[in-house]
Amino acid sequence: MPGLTQAQDPGSDPTLPEITPREIEIRGEYRVVFPSLERPTLQELQPRTRVQALPLEGLPAASPIGFRIDALPPLNLDPPEANYEDRSPLAPLLNGMNGSLEVAGGRFTERRAAADVQLPISARTDLRLHGDYEGMNGAQPFDQRDVRTAFETGSGTLDLSYRGTSWRLVSNVDGAYRQYDLYGLQDAPERTVARIGTEHTLRVYDGLPLTWTVGYEGHDLETRAFSFSTQRFHSNLEATVGLSAIDLRIEGAAELAGHLGNAAFSGDSRSGTLHGIVRLVDRPDLQVEGGASIISMTTNLARPGTPSGHTYGAPYALVEWRPDTRWMLYAEQRPSLALHTPIDLAETNPYLSGIPDLGGTAHTLDATAGVQWSAGTAQIDAHAGVTHSPTRRFFAQDNTSLFTLQYLEATTWMLGADATLQALTPWFGTVSLQYTGGSVAEGDGLPLVARTTGEATMGYQFSERQARLQLHLRGQSARDLSSAGTATAPGFVAVGVSGDVQITPNIEITAYVQDIGSNDATEWPGYPQPVARVGGGLRLLW
């Protein structure tokens, strides 16, 4: 039977416990710190470079060249096809032409002109034209006489070069002219020297490597007292023959000269030189050559009382050792012979007296040893040498203020140093110093040979190499007037400054001051030169 059961009174309110806290107590400390935001650098965004450890035996090494540069065949590259804007007939011919033209003038009515043009005729043929002119009304060197240091000189050359696959032929025609006054004499007579000639050189690189040169030229020397003409033929040959174990190099030279209207092949003067050379050691760091030489000379115009012919034999030797890439030690003994002609003598000493004595200079001992250091654009060479000459040309001054020739036996020695700084940096220049000593068989001195000579050129480029300034120095010490050494000619020092500024890519302005120095820069006694030559000019480039 169901029944109702009640646990609580429905009309009563339920009572709940109090759970809301009345107090909150915090024990300890806690700080909220947010990280700061910073922008990283670009280097930090790049991954770190990994350095690889390389084995030492795999590093590159530098070593000197172990072959002759001049024996390499020519590099024949065909020029790219030109896109001519000018369709005139001369446009293809003038494409690739470059050259320069310079004109200048200055004090003493000095005038200069020089031109150089290089023109590729075809892919394998090149033409080059070069010409120089210089003249001056001159200064008055003596107060007592009305004479001047006037002169005019000019020269020109035409070169034609043709390149084959394994050979090259270079032909040229050249000439020179000079007119000047012998102002050391009382009446200052005029002298004229002229030369014209041609020369051809063939180089073969494959098969039998050789270099062969032949040439023919004519000389004329005229003055009031006499005239003299010479025709000369010369030929040089250098060939290398490969044998089973060694290479044999043959070097030969021959020269024939005819005088006073005779042709060169008349043989009034003749000379010959023959070198047989064997390369004994041929390594990148060491080269050793040995051989023998024969030199011979004969002339019909020797001074009375002197031998008309000479023949000598002498050894040949060459050693070059490179302990590293910067240093080279070398030693060489090479006999030589030079047959003198009027034009050669007049270029060395313009103030000769009368018909010259046409002998020769023979060096049977001409040994040189030295050390060479090079690093980057700098190079220094220090050397010493000794020379013995059974016959050697010297000049001596006579009583008329002109110079005569002497051929004497002589032994000389020298010490020298050269330094070069190439123009790859703002600074560039060259310096050369030499000290010479010795004696002749008939005396103690070397006639008109300076004991100390020096020459230097230092330059600086600035304004992004558009301007250049150069300082020139040259000088020599006192010289003995004769082999006795009883009288001397004073030495001199000459200073010059030159500069040029490029105002457009094709136009330059030049300026110069030459021969500011002592003793009027007198190289030959009795013939002082004009000093403080100031001038300037214009140079065109294309």
Image: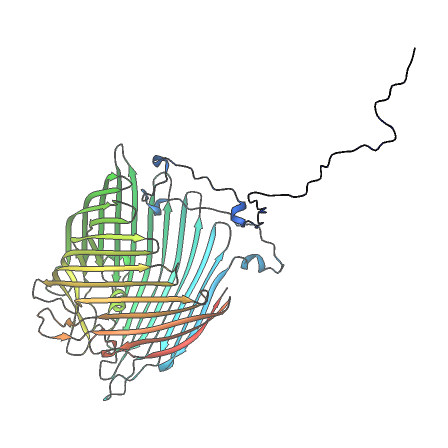
Residue 249 coordinates in the image, percent (x, y): 26, 42
The answer to whether 397 is drawn above or below residue 200 in the figure is below
Q: Is residue 301 visible?
A: no
Given residues 351 and 143, the one toward you in this image is 143
Q: Residue at x 24, y 66 (%)?
A: 454
Quarter of the image where the N terminus is located? top right
The answer to whether 137 is drawn above or below residue 161 in the figure is below
Toward the top, the furthest residue is: 1
Given residues 189 and 369, the one toward you in this image is 369
Residue 128 coordinates in the image, percent (x, y): 44, 59
The answer to whether 493 is drawn above or below residue 214 in the figure is below
Q: Residue at x 60, y 43 (%)?
A: 26
Q: Is residue 508 visible?
A: yes
Toward the right, the furthest residue is: 1
- Position of 25 with respect to 401 (left or right) is right
Toward the bottom, the furthest residue is: 144
- Position of 68 with respect to 390 (left or right) is right
Count of numbered labels shown in the rendering: 0
What coloring was used for the rendering? rainbow
Given residues 525 and 224, the one toward you in this image is 525
Q: Residue at x 46, y 65 (%)?
A: 464
Q: State the image quarter where residue 358 is shown.
A: bottom left
- Position of 181 with respect to 304 (left or right) is right
Residue 379 coordinates in the image, percent (x, y): 30, 56
Residue 467 coordinates in the image, percent (x, y): 43, 69
